[in-house]
Image (cartoon, grey):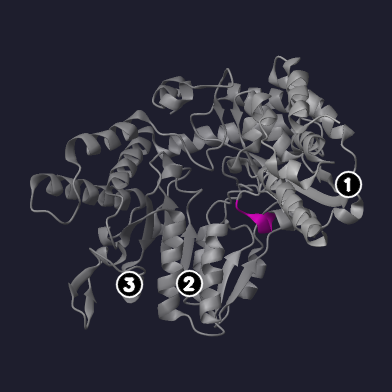
């Protein structure tokens, strides 16, 4: 089915905005996506009709609020095909989820000399929590390299796997290069050694169908705001056996069964990992976002985004002196590039004046920039509500940038 | 020599000639080319102000009771604004620099460039210029 993009754009109020006197062309979807009216309405409804703290009260509002929150958990469970709803933990986002695993898994399983494997194309959020854990436990961080096109070297990965490896944490899609990693292969190879795998789905969940049981990943994490939901809510999926064995990450309300000054016993899953008042309204917003995505159909979204990616890639390649960083055969709708010797900041500043929003800088992936020996890139990241006309505007804008700075 | 505020007014007048952003940016590109080059030995890690978006190098020296700044940036628009800041604040006494209120950036419509959220190094550059002024002021007072 081909999507009616004009109709879809009507669902996103912000896309009607003018920026610097021009219609907004929003190509910063990798940083955050815009929200459909249904998500905005769901959040407004929570505050105007049902707001009350969850899992606490005996009263009607609290019951409704709790039910909406637990319904959101079941929506996420079905969306990623988790076996049990208690395997879905709500967090503040991808960063919160990875920090929770790095801490709790580290406390339970990591000792001096153990090894953690990540890849060279990780976002800082999938580097720093592991580094902190390694410092705490005197463990070592091992890094899977990638080639000039931005493809992970699986032979090198296999060489890193050994009897000291305790966990592998890799991204599904690189936020700076766009590479779609062969996560099923990465998971299977780790499992051959009995090693669990965490997948950072921050740039994956919104672009393709994810089935955590088919993948057999041990942890899968993502953020609500990158899949058309609100900020401040995210998901940590973990296999029940791991989550049960790991100690809680944070202490507080809701995560306990019984508290005395001598000893506290912890609540069951998922509550053990949900200390304090959670962003329950964010969870309802995320649930509305997932329902919206389900209505459009992820398979339709993927087709549309791949068409945009191909169109944009071929158009950008026609611009003389433009270099694309990340040329993997399988890519998400992300294009990192540099225009001759022009600084990406200059590129972004001029495009902004034309109403075109891109990202510039290191994209929280400084090691990737170091590998390519560059200071940063300009990045256009698309989603299904973008159009070919907007991409044409981007190309025209870049030609203008070249005229100004070339 | 004009006062800091006279210079700020002068710059505001210069920019008033340009109606749209494109002309303003083209003027900044021209200004960036006129910025006196920083001595390569001062373009060091020590003098680097690292923003996420662009980098700025700044060196300040005390010459005859006045602070002389030289600076550079790897992004051209940033460098154009660096040139304006150097034009306004270089070759001034530490007190003049410390008492200066910079309003011209706002008035010429480039406010977003001097916002802490931009991480282009310019906000830190202004802070660093004041730090130089403060350090030299202290040094001069000690010598007196």
From the image, tell me which residue sits under label 2: A191
Q: Position of residue A43 (x, y in %)?
A: 29, 37
Figure quadrant of the N terminus of chain A: top left
| Helix, strand or loop at mark 2 | helix
Q: Nearer the viewer, mark 2 or mark 1?
A: 1
Is label 3 on the same chain as label 2? yes
From the image, tell me which residue sits under label 1: B38
- As displayed, is residue A300 above or below residue B47? above
Query: Would residue A148 be seen by someone viewing this image from the given angle?
Result: no
B24 in magenta: no
Q: Nearer the viewer, residue A312 or A342?
A: A342
Q: Earlier in the sequence, mark 3 or mark 2?
A: 2
Q: Residue at 41% x, 65% y: name it.
A: A100
Q: Nearer the viewer, residue B111 or A344?
A: B111
Q: Position of residue A63 (x, y in %)?
A: 13, 49
| Helix, strand or loop at mark 3 | helix
Q: Nearer the viewer, residue A264 or A15?
A: A264
- Mark 2 and 1 residues: CB-CB less than 8 Å, in contact? no
Is label 2 on the same chain as label 1? no
| Helix, strand or loop at mark 1 | loop
From the image, tell me which residue sits under label 3: A241
Q: Residues within 10 Å of mark 3 (few under 14, many from 20)?
A: few
Q: Residues within 10 Å of mark 1 (few under 14, many from 20)?
A: some
Q: CA distance from mark 3 to mark 2?
A: 15 Å
* Side (left or right) of A257 relative to B43: left
Q: Nearer the viewer, mark 3 or mark 1?
A: 1
Q: Residue at 73% x, 16% y: name it.
A: B16
Magenta segment boundaries in residue numbering: A364-368
* Side (left or right) of A59 relative to A80: left
């Amino acid at each position: 089915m081909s999507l009616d993009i004009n109709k879809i754009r009507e669902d996103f109020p912000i896309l009607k905005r003018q920026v610097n006197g021009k219609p907004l062309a929003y190509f910063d979807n990798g940083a955050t996506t815009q929200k459909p009216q249904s998500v905005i309405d769901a959040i407004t409804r929570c505050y105007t009709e049902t707001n009350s703290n969850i899992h606490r009260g005996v009263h009607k509002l609290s019951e409704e609020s709790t039910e909406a929150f637990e319904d959101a958990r079941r929506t996420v469970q079905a969306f990623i095909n988790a076996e049990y709803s208690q395997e879905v933990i709500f967090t503040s986002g991808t960063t919160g989820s990875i920090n929770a695993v790095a801490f709790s898994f580290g406390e339970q399983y990591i000792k001096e000399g153990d090894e953690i494997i990540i890849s060279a194309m990780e976002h800082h959020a999938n580097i720093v929590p592991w580094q902190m854990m390694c410092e705490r436990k005197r463990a070592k961080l091992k890094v899977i390299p990638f080639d000039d096109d931005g493809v992970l070297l699986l032979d090198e990965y296999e060489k890193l796997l050994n009897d000291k490896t305790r966990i592998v944490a890799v991204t599904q899609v690189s936020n700076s290069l766009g590479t779609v990693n062969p996560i099923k292969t990465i998971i299977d190879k780790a499992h051959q050694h009995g090693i669990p795998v965490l997948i950072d789905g921050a740039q994956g969940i919104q672009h393709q169908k994810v089935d955590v049981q088919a993948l057999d990943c041990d942890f899968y994490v993502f953020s609500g705001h990158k899949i058309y939901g609100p900020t401040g809510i995210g998901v940590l999926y973990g296999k029940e056996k791991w989550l049960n064995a790991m100690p809680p990450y944070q202490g507080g309300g809701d995560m306990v069964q019984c508290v005395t000054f001598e000893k506290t016993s912890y609540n069951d899953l998922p509550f053990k990992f949900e200390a304090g008042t959670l962003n329950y309204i964010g969870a309802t917003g995320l649930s509305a976002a997932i329902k919206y995505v389900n209505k459009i159909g992820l398979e339709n979204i993927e087709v549309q985004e791949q068409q945009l990616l191909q169109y944009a890639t071929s158009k950008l390649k026609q611009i003389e002196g433009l270099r694309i960083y990340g040329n993997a055969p399988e890519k998400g709708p992300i294009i990192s590039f540099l225009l001759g010797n022009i600084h990406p900041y200059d590129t972004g500043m001029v495009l902004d004046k034309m109403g075109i929003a891109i990202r510039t800088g290191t994209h929280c992936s400084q090691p990737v920039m170091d590998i390519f020996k560059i200071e940063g890139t300009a990045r256009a990241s698309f989603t299904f509500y973008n159009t070919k006309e907007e991409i044409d505007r981007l190309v025209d804008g870049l030609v203008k940038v070249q005229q100004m700075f070339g | 020599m004009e006062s800091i505020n006279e210079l700020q007014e002068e710059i505001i007048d210069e920019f008033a000639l340009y109606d749209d952003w494109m002309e303003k940016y083209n003027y900044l590109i021209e200004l960036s080319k006129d910025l006196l080059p920083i001595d390569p030995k001062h373009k060091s890690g020590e003098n680097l102000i690292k923003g996420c978006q662009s980098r700025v190098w700044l060196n300040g020296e005390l010459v005859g009771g006045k602070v002389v700044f030289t600076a550079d940036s790897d992004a051209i628009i940033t460098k154009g604004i660096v040139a304006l800041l150097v034009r306004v604040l270089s070759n001034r006494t530490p007190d003049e620099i410390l008492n200066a209120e910079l309003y011209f950036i706002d008035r010429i419509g480039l406010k977003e460039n001097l916002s802490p959220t931009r991480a282009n190094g310019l906000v830190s550059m202004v802070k660093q210029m004041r730090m130089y002024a403060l350090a030299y002021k202290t040094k001069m007072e000690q010598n007196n």
